[in-house]
Amino acid sequence: MKTISHWIGGKPVEGVSGNFGPVYNPATGAQEKQVAFASADEVDAAVSAAKEAFRTWGSSSLAKRTSVLFKYRELLDAHREEIAQLITAEHGKVHSDALGEVARGLEIVELACGIPEKLKGELSTQVSTRVDVAAIRQSLGVVAGITPFNFPAMVPMWMFPLAIACGNTFVLKPSEKVPSAAFKLAELAAEAGLPDGVLNVVNGDKVAVDAILEHPDIAAVSFVGSTPIARYIHTTGTANGKRVQALGGAKNHMLVLPDADLDLAADSAINAAYGSAGERCMAISVVVAVGDTADPLIGKIKERADQLRIGPGDDPASEMGPLITKVHRDKVASYVTGAAAQGADVVIDGSGYTVEGYEDGHWMGVSLLDHVTPEMDAYRDEIFGPVLSVVRVETYDEAVALMNNSPWGNGTAIFTRDGGAARRFQMEIEAGMVGVNVPIPVPVGYHSFGGWKDSLFGDHHIYGNDGVHFYTRGKVVTTRWPDPSDGGINLGFPSNH
């Protein structure tokens, strides 16, 4: 059985802890690989390699960094099919979705290629007689990223390309469920000419996570995952003196007003709720239907959902693949049966779905719940699966109050033809990312991704300008070059004249 090892100091390093985790093919349910779990000592070895590499990489020229990143972007583009296949084999998402993931990750690599523009400082001349003030940004040192299972390539690429472009070195801890894509990203970075130790990958479980959070030589940690773990990462990391950005979970709502294009809304609800089997922090899991919108909208959603083709991700005919593990599949299914017991109408029940020839796969069909109320578990919890709930309200104001009462504030959307209503919504809604007739408003690479409330712990969103600021710190330099005729002693407080 193939073993996925670590990548430390520019080369593969076999695990020595003796602990391994299974890596499954979600479509078959079979274990096809194992991944080495790092001990605290192995994490320390990766950090030491990164610390040593920072001595030269941190002072390297912007020209050198960007030359490596341009080559890296070229190699990623050439290998995007291979990376997508690794994602499909371990996560289960369909191949087209995996290719889209790689493409969105490449956006941040391209942003990193433009780092000279992002790191331009500011200069004020003659603030006082012959005194100039410059504001510059400098790298932090060794930084780390802890990434989730649902985007094995994209989320790591949201982190390390920008971090290393800013002059930092990086230790990546990917999800132990999907380790191969991250390893491939490290291999290609080395091929692009990235110096040994600038990018390191350590696999593992909570032992590796805690070793990262407690390590004195790591200056900052980026995280994407569930809200409880994000809170733990932020609390533990900051207690150990680190800068932390921890992106948590979500319960994203899609508001549909009576004047909306219901065909567009139905298509969007299908795409946003069931794409990637709902295993997205930006998935729409609740449709809030205003007035008489619910009945015709549900009919259109059901009509489309009944036509979806579910199967192995490597089958070109498949539009939705399996869930990541059997345990997670069973948990998602429990919300459908639980919603029925709590009074919801189960319009579509996907809990018993199987695929012929793949009966041991982690299958879950799409599910659609109507007459869901805020007291139900299906509404309150982040399900992270292909379950869409419909909540009926009478007015726009009732809808916004419902949505703003959620503890999460990641992404949201409104579907309407009314520009005034859309503008009011984008100002009143308490969420970090808003779509107007766009169901999954993930920002492009040169803007930043991040939510509000329990969807983000820390002060910086990820990538974009926020990402540059997270991976650097500011310094202000005040300079005076005295004229040769200057001299004398003055013990008074300096004044600006």
Image (tube, grey):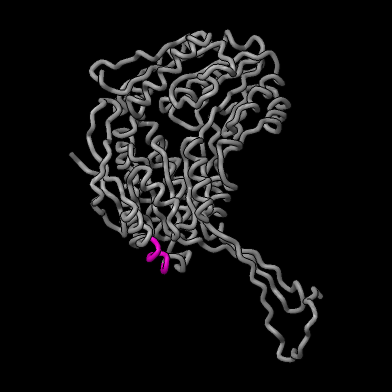
Residue 467 lies, with reference to residue 92, above or below; the image says: below
Is 53 contained in the magenta span?
A: yes
- Looking at the rendered structure, the number of numbered marks drawn on it comes to 0
Horizontal and vertical percent position of residue 344: 52, 10
Report if residue 73 is visible in the image: no
Q: Look at the image and tell me in which quarter the C terminus lies.
A: bottom right
Residue positioned 69% across, 79% down in the render: 480
Q: Main secondary structure of the magenta part?
A: helix
- In this rendering, position of residue 32 left or right of residue 134: left
Q: Is residue 358 visible?
A: yes
Q: Which residues are magenta?
A: 50-56
Residue reaching furthest to the right: 497
Task: Name, please, the residue furthest toward the left.
Answer: 1
Report the front residue among 3 and 341.
341
Q: Quadrant of the N terminus?
A: top left
Q: Residue, x 76% and y 75% (percent of image)?
A: 128
Residue located 57% across and 46% down the image: 458
- 289 and 31: which one is in front? 31
